[in-house]
Amino acid sequence: MHKPLKALITGGAKGIGLAISQALQQKGFQVTALGRDEQSLAIAKAAGFIEDYLVLDLAIGQNWDELANKLTFDFSVLVNNAGIYVWQPAENTTSNDVQALFALNFFAAEKLSSLCLGHMKQQRWGRILNIASVSGTTGEANAGVYAASKGALIAYSRSLALELASLDITVNCISPGWVKTELFTRTELSEEEILSTVPAHRWVSASELGALAAFLCGDEAQSITGQNICVCAGLSLG
Ligand code: NAD
């Protein structure tokens, strides 16, 4: 690994993404964040957790050309972290929900991966890290389309890992359990109800995820590829 390497992260100024930005920055990466919320991006930059940022709605398809014009895709690390969660019974899930979930949770990750691959292949080194979810393998009642979008991300990551293994480009997923960010407030479950489903009866901390992300993005994780690592306080065990 030749430092400083450039890292691109989506949703890198809030929640889990902010913890990953911090951990990558501490490891010596120059972090660029893409996100919707300008205020949190500006705060993260002022705090030194990210080097630069671009305000962008990643769920809107026509922004890809605009992005390719504004950003040089010479990143060694890509972290697809931004995601949305919709919690409601299957019969109430609308086509708009389905589109929005897949647009951000899967299509944006796929598109950014393809935009980053040219440089990674050229330098024969790269890390793609996708933030999936325990739901992507276990399923989740009242969040079936969310689970499906994360399942797609996990399957895509395994396939990409196979395709890129000989070039020293690794592709992995981290699947968190429950983390106390803005996202969890979209369920109608109380905190007690959530924790009663978690074997260790506690929230996963964003900093645990940041530390693992930084490890997976370093040289020391060169042989870890195609994996989906659950960080979930036992939630994935059933
Ligand atoms: P969060 O809501 O705190 O943060 C989401 C981030 O994504 C924010 O920075 C937001 O600005 C960005 N974002 C949302 N929509 C966007 C869009 N259209 N364009 C650009 N950016 C957009 O959530 P979080 O908990 O930090 O979630 C991060 C990732 O972790 C997500 O992929 C989520 O599915 C996953 N995850 C979270 C939990 C949890 O319990 N919090 C559990 C499993 C997986």
Image (spheres, rainbow, N blue to C red):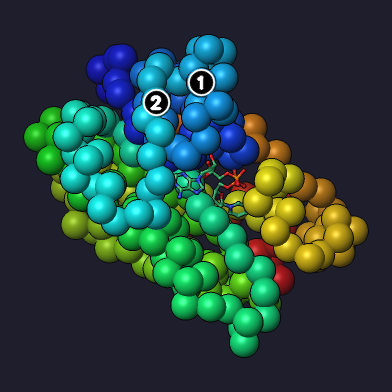
Which of 89 and 118 lies nearest the eye of the viewer?
Answer: 89
**Above-or-below relation of 47 to 107:** above
Q: Position of residue 182 (x, y in %)?
A: 68, 46
Residue located farthest toward the right when viewing the structure as drawn = 192
Could you tell whether 39 is left or right of 1 in the image?
Answer: right
Task: Residue at 85% x, 55% y: name it.
Answer: 191
Q: Quadrant of the C terminus?
A: bottom right
Residue located farthest toward the bottom when viewing the structure as drawn = 91
Q: On the image, which quarter does residue 153 sit in?
A: bottom left
Q: Can residue 226 be seen in this view?
A: no
**Mark 1 or mark 2, earlier in chain:** 1
Q: Position of residue 119 (x, y in %)?
A: 15, 34
Element class at badge 2? strand
Element class at badge 1? helix
**Above-or-below relation of 224 to 100:** above
Residue located farthest toward the left when viewing the structure as drawn = 122
Could you tell whether 75 is left or right of 202 in the image?
Answer: left
Crowd rating for badge 2 (residues with CA inside 10 Å; few <14, some 14–19, many 20+): many
Q: Quadrant of the N terminus?
A: top left
Q: Are marks 1 and 2 in contact (CB under 8 Å)?
A: yes
Using the numbered discs, state the Cα–Cα distance from disc 1 to disc 2 in whole angstroms.
8 Å
Q: Is residue 159 visible?
A: yes
Task: Residue at 61% x, 65% y: name it.
Answer: 86
Q: What kind of residue is marked 2?
A: Tyr
Residue beneath label 2, please?
53
Residue beneath label 1, please?
42
**Above-or-below relation of 221 to 198:** above
Task: Residue at 65% x, 64% y: name it.
Answer: 236
Q: What kind of residue is marked 1?
A: Ala
